Amino acid sequence: METQVKVVFDNLTRGMKYLLDAMEDMDLQVAEENIPHVDAVENVPHLKDSEPFPMTYYEPLKALWQDPNVQKAWERGNEAALPEKCVLLRQLCSDCPSLSFCSSDDPPII
């Protein structure tokens, strides 16, 4: 189970990084209130297999996903050939608003 948490966290944060990088090429910027969240996602730590999902990243990822220009970039994703990791990001951030993660001994609850 620990590895699943690590993979989910990695996919979410890397997916958002890819989307943010694509926004630069599209001349899009996140809203001013979301700039600190960009910094958090850009400097995300690597999880060890035994670490739980760091819930401090849930709200920043959710806020970034809800940013209007992030949504525009998502809609234009074919221009940037966004990877499949971004699909997981969309599913977790918009389809599952009550997403929560348990300890590293338990699977993610989606």
Image (tube, grey):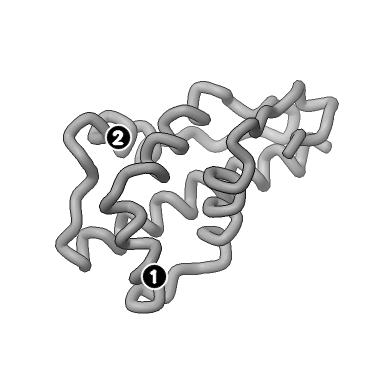
Name the residue located 26 percent from the left edge and 59 percent from the top edge.
Answer: 23
Task: Say which quadrant the N terminus sits in.
Answer: top right
- Please, what is the three-letter code of the amino acid marked with disc 1? Gly
Q: Residues within 10 Å of mark 2 (few under 14, many from 20)?
A: few
Q: Which of marks 2 and 1 is in front?
A: 1
Left or right side of 18 for 9: right
**Spot occupied by residue 62 in the image (x, y as percentages of width and height):** 46, 36
Residue 58 is marked as: none
The quadrant in which residue 67 appears is top left
In this rendering, the answer to whether 94 lies above or below 2 is below
Q: Are marks 2 and 1 in contact (CB under 8 Å)?
A: no
Q: Closest to the observer: 7 or 77?
A: 77
Label 2 to label 1: alpha-carbon separation: 22 Å
Task: Say which quadrant the C terminus sits in.
Answer: top right
- Please, what is the three-letter code of the amino acid marked with disc 2? Asp
Q: What element carries label 2?
A: helix
Which residue matches tag 2? 39
Left or right side of 65 for 72: left
Mark closest to the chain's N terminus, 2 or 1:
2
Name the residue located 67 percent from the left edge and 47 percent from the top edge.
Answer: 7
Q: How crowded is mark 1: few (under 14 residues within 10 Å), some or many (20 or more)?
A: some
Q: Closest to the observer: 6 or 20?
A: 20
Name the residue located 59 percent from the left edge and 36 percent from the top edge.
Answer: 97
**Spot occupied by residue 53 in the image (x, y as percentages of width and height):** 64, 29
**Spot occupied by residue 64 in the image (x, y as percentages of width and height):** 37, 40
**Spot occupied by residue 32 in the image (x, y as percentages of width and height):** 17, 34
Q: Closest to the observer: 12 or 77?
A: 77
Name the residue located 43 percent from the left edge and 50 percent from the top edge.
Answer: 16
Left or right side of 80 for 45: right
Q: Closest to the observer: 67 or 44?
A: 67
Which residue matches tag 1? 77
